[in-house]
């Protein structure tokens, strides 16, 4: 869908983005990750053409992106709000018309959404009468109403209670299944594993990680396996000999759950060959690191003395 | 509908629908027309009839004092004690000093303070009477004196337009009125633009909006939308005020010259006409000829065209700067330091415009009518009085257009960065840096 090629953005002496090259695949959910001030919002603003890059270019479906491409995007910014004094329905129609929908079209679609989310009674209320969560729902609807091909959500879950967050989550997956490309930035690593097909991790203006979630987790795998056996800890340790290393083990009566790291040059098969004669193996499962751990590992690897404060945070 | 039209429409409709708009639209004319009508009404009706007791111990006043409107005179040669005056039906007592001929001074004691109008009647009548006595004492013939005293009627003529009297000053006042109107409008609605921008920033809707429209479109939409609101309000004001004035004046006038009442007093229609003529002709006929002459002398299409031009450009110039300020700050209190340099040129302009009415050829007036930030108001005065050569007008207009393009460009750059900048105390230096950011 979108390819970024060497995007650089500077604010005076501060470099907000330093040579970002990555791809957002079509019809998938892409997670843009990074600590506060890493440059996520700046990157999103460049993609939505709110601001322009100092260097680099953006390709959309293989051709350079133009101003018209904005109309196929739906953007929910992190700093979001509505006109407080305007009525909900009127305001939603206005925002939809700014996106190019006709008045009748916008009204019809909105009525449908409002019905589906059981909020039809809000139509004539002023925004200031709504709770924060209610306003967020209105905002989400206005973002997706014009049926964008690319949906960009900056911290979509912030401000939602768990029930509404679930509503938005299922809505994102529904839209993805309709073939819409979704790009979202979030701090919730659990939702990344649950929602995202691929990610890009930005830290201190640079792209640190990029690829599918599965590949990245495998890449960060530490060759550690969880082994369930019937037998003693000592028997296990002896059986491993040089093929692997016992990290820790928990005994449950006769049974033992152990974590084993493969030795250099060994495969799981080598380990199993050693174990099978010695103990009764009930199960083996590779331990794949959580996104949470990968995030912390990557971000804290080259932690500088001071954290540079970014533009928006 | 085009996006910028949509923005203009929203700015217009949400503002016009506000209760405050309705209140201001009604309240404005009520205050203006009410003020004028009240003055007219008070002028037509003196609260109390003043019975003025003039104490003239030296017998200076030899003629009868002519009673004026709501003022009647009573002459007495004896000194009155304060208590006697208090007990009397007289409301005002004037003590002429013994030496009033050489030292024209009198003390006025009142029970109820006479209006300025009544005071003027008292003063004029006494002055006239004392003057007559002086003339008699000096042995000067009254008619001769009147001939001598005739004031010089100094008429002005522009050498380029011999034959018609010049009313440059009066025309300048008309220009000043236009300029003052501009000043009020630009200030009122410019500040509204600033507030509107701040509202969008504070409610955090601005980033949602600029993902659909360009920041510059958003800014211009707001500026134009608010101007349309202003025009609507002024048109309504003029309409309502005019209607109220016509009705109100008819009521007051009807009160004064009620034909029925006059008929009861045995006054015929012919006599009524005579009465009106006597009262009105002298002042009225003169005024009318002056006004028609004045209007003839003003190049109305030029003045209106120039007014529209300066009005629109001046508003765009200032409101774009105010929009930039609104975008840069987080709260109303932060606006002060940036507002100051924007308001100062406007205030200078209105002061210089006042000066231009009385001293149109001063160099300050010339320069301020060319400098774009002050030119809309000052040039308006000069054009109305016809003291600006065409080349100066053209130069001033070109400079204003260039400056307005420049400031709108600058404001647009500050605006698009400012609206996305939260929680930062902005300085002039910071804003300067924003200009260099690539869009």
Image: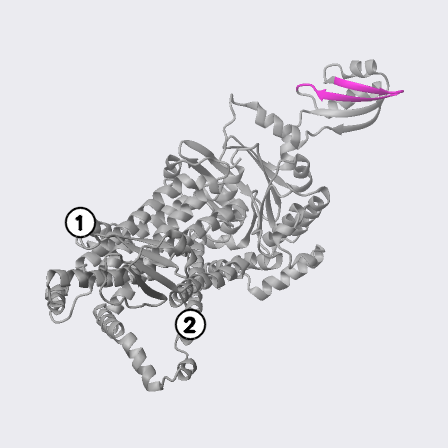
Task: Give the vertical position of B411 relative to A95 (above or below).
Answer: above
Q: Is residue B155 visible?
A: no
User: Colour scheme in the image?
Assistant: one colour
Residue B353 position within the rendered picture, expressed as x and y whole percent measured from the top left: 26, 53
Q: Quadrant of residue B75?
A: bottom left
Q: Quadrant of residue A113?
A: bottom right
Residue A136 position within the rendered picture, expressed as x and y whole percent measured from the top left: 63, 48
Task: Give the vertical position of B315 relative to A296 (above or below).
Answer: below
Magenta region, main secondary structure: strand
> For mark 1, what is the residue?
B363
> For mark 2, what is the residue?
B252
Q: Is residue B194 left or right of residue B95?
A: right
Q: Is residue A174 left or right of residue A104?
A: right
| In this view, the mark in front (2 or 1) | 2
Q: Is residue A214 left or right of residue A256?
A: left
Query: Which residue is rendered at x = 22% and y = 70% of the image?
Result: B290
Q: Is residue A73 left or right of residue B94?
A: right
Q: Chain of mark 2?
A: B
Q: Earlier in the sequence, mark 2 or mark 1?
A: 2
Q: Nearer the viewer, residue B414 or B187?
A: B187
Callout count: 2
Task: Please tell me whether mark 1 sits on a helix, a strand or a loop.
Answer: helix
- Tell me, yes or no, whether dots 2 and 1 are on the same chain: yes
Task: Give the vertical position of A27 relative to B277 (above or below).
Answer: above
**Residue A251 within the segment the image draws in magenta:** yes
Residue B263 position within the rendered picture, expressed as x and y whole percent measured from the top left: 40, 84
**Position of the C terminus of chain B by quadrant:** top left
Task: Please tell me whether mark 2 sits on a helix, a strand or a loop.
Answer: helix
Density class for disc 2 (Cα within 10 Å; few <14, some 14-19, many ≥20) is some
Write the start and end of the magenta stretch as one range.
A247-264
Identify the mark at residue B194; answer none if there is no mark: none
Q: Furthest residue to the front?
A: B78
């Amino acid at each position: 869908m979108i390819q970024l090629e060497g995007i650089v953005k500077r604010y005076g002496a501060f470099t907000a983005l330093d040579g970002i090259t990555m791809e957002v695949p079509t019809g998938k959910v892409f997670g843009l990750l990074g600590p506060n001030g890493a440059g996520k919002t700046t990157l999103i603003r460049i993609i939505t053409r709110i601001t322009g890059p100092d260097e680099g270019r953006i390709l959309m479906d293989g051709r350079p992106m133009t101003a018209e491409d904005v109309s196929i995007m739906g953007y929910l910014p992190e700093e979001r709000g509505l006109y407080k004094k305007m009525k909900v329905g009127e305001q939603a129609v206005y925002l939809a018309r700014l996106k190019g929908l006709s008045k009748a079209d916008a009204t019809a679609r909105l009525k449908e959404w409002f019905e589906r989310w059981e909020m039809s009674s809000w139509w004539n209320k002023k925004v200031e009468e709504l709770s924060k969560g209610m306003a967020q729902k209105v905002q989400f609807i206005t973002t997706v109403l014009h049926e964008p091909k690319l949906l960009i959500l900056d911290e979509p879950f912030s401000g939602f209670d768990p029930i509404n967050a679930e509503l938005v989550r299922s809505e994102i997956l529904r839209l993805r299944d309709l073939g819409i490309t979704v790009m979202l930035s979030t701090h919730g690593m659990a939702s990344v594993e649950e929602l995202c097909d691929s990610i890009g991790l930005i830290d201190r203006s640079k792209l640190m990680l990029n690829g599918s979630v599965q590949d990245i987790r495998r890449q960060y795998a530490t060759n550690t396996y969880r082994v369930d056996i019937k037998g003693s800890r000592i028997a296990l340790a002896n059986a491993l000999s040089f093929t692997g290393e016992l990290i820790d083990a928990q005994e449950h009566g006769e049974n033992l759950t152990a974590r084993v790291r493969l030795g250099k040059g060994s495969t799981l098969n080598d380990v199993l060959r050693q174990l099978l004669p010695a103990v009764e193996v009930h199960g083996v499962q590779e331990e794949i690191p959580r996104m949470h751990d990968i995030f912390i590992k990557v971000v804290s690897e080259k932690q500088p003395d001071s954290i540079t404060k970014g533009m928006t945070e | 509908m085009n996006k910028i039209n949509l923005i203009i429409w929203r700015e217009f409709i949400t503002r016009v629908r506000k209760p405050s708009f309705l209140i201001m639209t009604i309240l404005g004319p009520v205050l203006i027309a009410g003020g004028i009508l009240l003055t007219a009404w008070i002028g037509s009706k003196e609260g109390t009839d003043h019975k003025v007791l003039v104490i003239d111990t030296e017998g200076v006043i030899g003629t009868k004092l002519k009673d004026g409107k709501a003022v009647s005179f009573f002459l007495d040669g004896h000194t009155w004690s304060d208590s006697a005056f208090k007990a009397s039906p007289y409301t005002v007592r004037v003590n002429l000093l013994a030496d009033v001929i050489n030292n024209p001074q009198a003390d006025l004691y009142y029970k109820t303070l006479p209006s300025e109008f009544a005071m003027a009647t008292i003063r004029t009548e006494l002055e006239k009477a004392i003057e007559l006595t002086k003339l008699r004492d000096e042995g000067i013939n009254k008619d001769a004196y009147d001939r001598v005293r005739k004031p010089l009627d100094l008429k002005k003529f522009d050498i380029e337009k011999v034959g018609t009297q010049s009313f440059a000053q009066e025309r300048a006042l008309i220009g000043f009125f236009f300029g003052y109107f501009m000043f009020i409008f630009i200030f009122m609605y410019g500040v509204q633009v600033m507030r509107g921008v701040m509202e969008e920033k504070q409610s955090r809707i601005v980033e949602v909006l600029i993902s659909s429209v360009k920041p510059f479109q958003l800014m211009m939409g707001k500026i134009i939308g608010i101007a349309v609101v202003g025009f609507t309000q002024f048109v309504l004001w003029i309409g309502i005020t005019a209607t109220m004035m016509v009705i109100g004046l008819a009521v007051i006038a009807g009160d004064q010259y009620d034909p029925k009442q006059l008929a009861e007093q045995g006054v015929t229609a012919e006599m009524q006409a005579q009465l009106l003529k006597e009262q009105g002709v002298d002042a009225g006929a003169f005024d009318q000829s002056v006004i028609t002459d004045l209007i003839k002398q003003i190049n109305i299409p030029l003045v209106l065209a120039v007014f529209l031009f300066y009005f629109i450009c001046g508003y765009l110039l200032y409101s774009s700067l105010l929009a930039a300020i609104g975008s840069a700050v987080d709260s109303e209190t932060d606006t002060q330091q940036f507002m100051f340099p924007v308001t100062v040129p406007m205030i200078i302009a209105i002061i210089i415009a006042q000066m231009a009415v009385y001293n149109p050829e001063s160099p300050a007036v010339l320069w301020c009518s060319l400098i774009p930030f002050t030119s809309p108001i000052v040039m308006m005065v000069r054009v109305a009085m016809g003291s600006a050569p065409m080349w100066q007008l053209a130069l001033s207009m070109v400079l204003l257009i260039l400056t307005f393009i420049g400031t709108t460009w600058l404001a647009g750059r500050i605006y698009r960065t400012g609206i996305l900048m939260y929680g930062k105390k902005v300085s002039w230096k910071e804003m300067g840096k924003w200009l260099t950011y690539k869009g």
